[in-house]
Structure formats: C-alpha cells, structure tokens
Amino acid sequence: MSLKRWLAENRLRAHKTNKDEIRDLLAIVERDLEDASFRDL
C-alpha cells in the first residue's frame, strides 16, 4: 500500500514540522542511542 493511498483513505495526515520539533526528535534519538550502549540497561 502506498503513502498516497493511505492519505486518500485518511489513514495518514499531512504534517508541517518546524526546526524545534526536529531538534527535539533528534535529541530523543541521541538519548536512546546512548541508552542502548549500556549493557545493563
């Protein structure tokens, strides 16, 4: 199934993002990658 079809079926919604949102998401990725480096976690 294509993304265009999902949009047509209202299974997805278009989203406009901004620099702050992307920065926050990248910070979460960094945190999760750091956590993944701990064997005992």
Image (cartoon, helix red, strand yellow):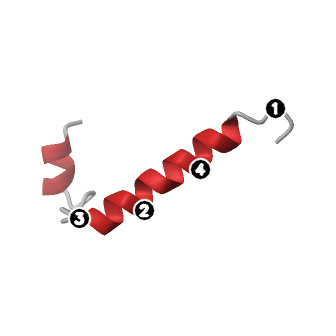
State which quarter of the image contains the C terminus. top right
Residue at mark 3: 17
Q: CA distance from mark 1 to mark 4?
A: 15 Å
Q: Is residue 39 above or below residue 16?
A: above
Q: Residue at x 59, y 50 (%)?
A: 31
State which quarter of the image contains the N terminus. top left
Amino acid type of the residue tagged 2 in the rendering? Asp
Amino acid type of the residue tagged 3 in the rendering? Thr
Q: Residues within 10 Å of mark 3 (few under 14, many from 20)?
A: few
Q: Are marks 2 and 4 in contact (CB under 8 Å)?
A: no
Report the residue that reaches farthest toward the right: 40
Q: CA distance from mark 1 to mark 3?
A: 34 Å
Whole-percent x, y for residue 2 in the image: 19, 38
Whole-percent x, y for residue 17 in the image: 23, 64
Give whichever of discs 3 and 2 has the lower sequence position: 3
The label on residue 31 is 4
6 relative position to 23: left or right: left
Residue at mark 2: 24
